Image (tube, grey):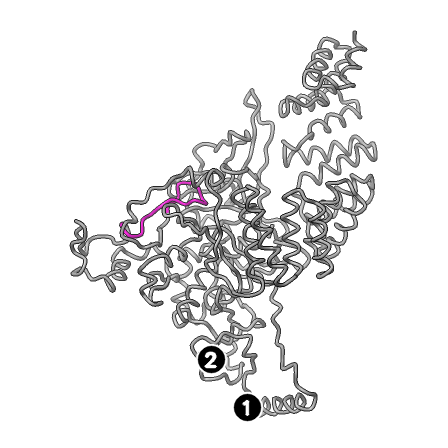
């Protein structure tokens, strides 16, 4: 999982009116309010669908939470509590357990040499990571509580812990199909991110109600969390509806509603409600400054984002978040003239387990009576058959490679013939490059720029061939020609950064910041580029400005501390890193850099040892972690622990010339010359030009 604003639409009252008419209008409105008590709204800020005005789609109407709905809608609410969407994100408690405990055996990550278990203790649940040495002794162990579960448990169930409003994924996932534990999606196929993979707003958006993001941070949310997908995700904000029910709203127009009933919307707006989470595509890009939480039921999703798919459709494997796209490919959909939508078959208030095959067959039979399809190409159709099993085949997921199968919503005669070519699915880089086309989009001045961003996102997420960066540049530059704006300049800079064209990246970042002063993402990237070329003063200046813009964004504060250290400003570096620890103490590099400050800057070996140990507890594979720990032990004359640390470093990296040389030097000082010569010679085999190893070896001879 990777790091992803609010809408700028406001109540723009009539701007081009002279002063006198404006006063007249104000007086009239004042009199109107006093005499009729009508509810006043801005027609440009609400949805008008087929003559019905949905007042709660206005941008200033507040969400109230699903609990406010229960008192009036108890039956539906109780059903919904047992539905899959009702369990999309919740506290992990014994009452909702679907997994099997105790775990029968640890899950072993052979590539990274970690073992994982999930266990229960005192009605709480934990995931443990550990590593064994050659004698089966535990040499590393870390435990985090599984505080939250994501997913209903119908297919997969994932787990998260929370740090100061940020959700971090745990390495184990429960596979309901196989009734077993597996590494979390992407942890085996791509990279095991262990306990550091956080839930970006873009991701958690579809597993929760509307979370409030901290204004001074990114992907960190205010408590209390409103867990699970609530009523307002499909019905829109409830503030006006409650006021209307309580007779505290005022008179509303006859053709208006204070809440959205999805079944009364036009087909495309109905689909948009489902597509906000079930149309994922290979990339999706927000419109302008819109945020993913800004979409409201009743709106068209294309006004919030553009979603992109390959031009050539994969007929076999589907993806999580692909159902509406596949449905719209169906002849049943295209010829239904809008009558076939998600709600035709699905009642999201209830669990899918409550529906029998007959429920779905009835939907098919309403258009395809048995007496018209009894004999087709040798197949005999009767009321006992399951239409879905042949025409909407259960198939594998290309973006969740855990043996999970979901229903392919592309309804077709020969669906049962599809066979997945997993080599294509798992290795897109071995196939021809794809062309991205929008499934939904707006025809505006930003269209080309959005497509350029889509190619960049596809490059980051799926396929790292430079062709996609070239396509991204083409569309982003075209977008700048149509409408120069800060976001397009920033994304173009990102592409040039990926292409290692740093001067071009800097030029575009400067343009972005010129158009949008305080643009924190652009300032942060600018700082990273300057750091890569050791222009530390410029890097510190840019990152400091990013921190001023987002003072609680921990990645900004962390990098500021690291660059200050690299520039030998130890005191300010320590201040920044201590602040980062207060915000979120999960990054091992914060502790590692603090160790470096105390070892190299302050010559305080004991304090350095403390920080290095904390870094290694979080990440035992941190580069040169045990090397620096060994050096610090040597500083305080604890030679035994220094030797152990150097040996651990060599076990992790047998080609560490510094660890081999330092270990040899310790043995030399202890007058154990045979061992000293052994390690000096090993170092010289790896690097014949190592002056230190040569010098020490000559001293022994």
Whether 670 is drawn above or below 184: the answer is above
Tell whether position 393 is magenta: yes
Indicate the position of residue 660 as horizontal and vertical percent values: 70, 19
* Residue 212 visible within the image: yes
**What segment is highlighted magenta in the picture?**
390-405
Indicate the position of residue 151 as horizontal and vertical percent values: 46, 50
Tell whether position 101 is magenta: no
Judge by depth and name the residue closer to the eye, 595 or 559. 559
Who's the residue at 39% across and 66% down the image? 76
Q: Which residue is mark 2?
A: 256
- Mark nearer the N terminus (2 vs 1): 1
User: Helix, strand or loop at disc 2?
Assistant: strand
Q: Is residue 261 left or right of residue 112?
A: left
Badge 2 local density, few (<14 within 10 Å), some, or many (20+)? Answer: some
Indicate the position of residue 668 as horizontal and vertical percent values: 77, 13
* Measured Cα–Cα span from mark 2 to mark 1: 17 Å
Whether 628 is drawn above or below 498: the answer is above
Q: Is residue 48 left or right of residue 679?
A: left
User: Helix, strand or loop at disc 1?
Assistant: helix
Res 688 quadrant in image: top right
Q: Which mark is residue 423?
A: none
Q: Nearer the viewer, mark 2 or mark 1?
A: 2
Q: Which residue is mark 1?
A: 36
Judge by depth and name the residue closer to the eye, 203 or 289. 289
């Amino acid at each position: 999982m990777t790091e992803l604003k609010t809408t700028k639409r406001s109540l723009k009252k009539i701007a081009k009116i002279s002063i006198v008419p404006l006063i007249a209008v104000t007086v009239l409105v004042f009199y109107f309010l006093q005499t009729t008590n009508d509810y006043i709204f801005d027609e440009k800020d609400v949805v008008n669908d087929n003559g019905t005005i949905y007042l709660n789609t206005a941008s200033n109407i507040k969400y109230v939470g699903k609990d406010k709905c229960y008192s009036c809608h108890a039956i539906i609410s109780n059903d919904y509590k047992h539905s899959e969407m009702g369990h999309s994100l919740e506290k992990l408690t014994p009452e909702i357990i679907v997994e099997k405990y105790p775990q029968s055996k640890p899950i072993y990550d052979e590539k990274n040499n970690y073992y994982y278990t999930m266990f229960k203790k005192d009605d709480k649940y934990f995931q443990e990571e550990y590593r064994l040495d050659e004698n089966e002794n535990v040499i590393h162990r870390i435990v985090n509580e599984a505080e939250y579960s994501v997913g209903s448990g119908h297919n997969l169930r994932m787990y998260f812990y929370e740090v100061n409003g940020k959700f971090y994924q745990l390495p184990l996932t429960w596979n309901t199909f196989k009734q077993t534990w597996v590494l979390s999606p992407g942890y085996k196929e791509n990279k095991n991110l262990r306990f550091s993979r956080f839930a970006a707003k873009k991701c958690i958006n579809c597993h929760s109600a509307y979370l409030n993001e901290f204004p001074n941070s990114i992907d960190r949310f205010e408590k209390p969390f409103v867990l699970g997908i609530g009523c307002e995700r499909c019905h829109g904000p409830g503030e006006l509806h409650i006021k209307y029910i309580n007779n505290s709203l005022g008179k509303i127009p006859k053709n208006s509603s204070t809440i959205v009933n999805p079944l009364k919307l036009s087909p495309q707006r109905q689909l948009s409600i489902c597509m906000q989470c079930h149309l994922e595509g290979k990339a999706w890009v927000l419109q302008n400054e819109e945020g993913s939480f800004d979409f409201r039921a009743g709106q068209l999703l294309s006004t919030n984002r553009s979603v992109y798919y390959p031009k050539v459709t994969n007929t076999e494997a589907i993806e999580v978040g692909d159902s509406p796209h596949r449905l719209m490919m169906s002849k049943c959909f295209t010829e239904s003239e809008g009558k076939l939508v998600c709600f035709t078959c699905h009642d999201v208030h209830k669990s899918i387990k409550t529906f029998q095959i007959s429920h779905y067959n009835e939907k098919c039979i309403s258009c395809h009576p048995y007496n018209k399809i009894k004999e087709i190409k040798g197949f005999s159709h009767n009321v006992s058959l399951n239409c879905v099993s042949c025409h909407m085949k259960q198939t594998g997921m290309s973006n969740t490679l855990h043996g999970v199968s979901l229903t392919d919503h592309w309804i077709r005669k020969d669906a049962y013939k599809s066979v997945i070519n997993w080599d294509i699915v798992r290795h897109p880089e071995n196939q021809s490059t794809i062309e991205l086309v929008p499934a939904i989009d707006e025809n505006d001045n930003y269209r080309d720029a959005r497509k350029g961003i889509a190619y960049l996102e596809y490059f980051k997420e799926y396929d790292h061939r430079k062709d996609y960066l070239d396509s991204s540049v083409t569309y982003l530059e075209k977008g700048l020609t149509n409408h120069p704006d800060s976001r397009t300049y920033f994304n173009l800079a990102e592409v040039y950064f990926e292409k290692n064209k740093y001067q071009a990246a800097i030029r575009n970042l400067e343009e972005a910041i010129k158009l949008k002063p305080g643009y924190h993402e652009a300032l942060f990237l600018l700082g990273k580029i300057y750091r890569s070329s050791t222009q530390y003063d410029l890097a510190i200046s840019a990152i400091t400005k990013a921190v001023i813009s987002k003072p609680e964004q921990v990645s900004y504060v962390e990098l500021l501390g690291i660059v200050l250290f690299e520039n030998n400003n130890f005191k300010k570096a320590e201040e920044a890193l201590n602040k980062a620890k207060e915000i979120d103490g999960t990054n091992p590099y914060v502790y590692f850099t603090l160790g470096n400050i105390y070892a190299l800057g302050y010559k305080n070996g004991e304090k350095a040892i403390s920080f290095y140990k904390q870094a290694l507890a979080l990440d035992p594979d941190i580069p040169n972690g045990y090397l620096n720990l060994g050096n610090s032990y040597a500083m305080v004359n604890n030679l035994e622990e220094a030797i152990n640390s150097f040996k651990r470093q060599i076990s992790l990296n047998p080609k560490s010339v510094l660890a081999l040389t330092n270990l040899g030097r310790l043995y030399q000082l202890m007058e154990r010359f045979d061992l000293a010569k052994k390690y000096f010679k090993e170092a010289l085999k790896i690097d014949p030009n190592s002056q230190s190893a040569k010098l020490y070896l000559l001293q022994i001879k």
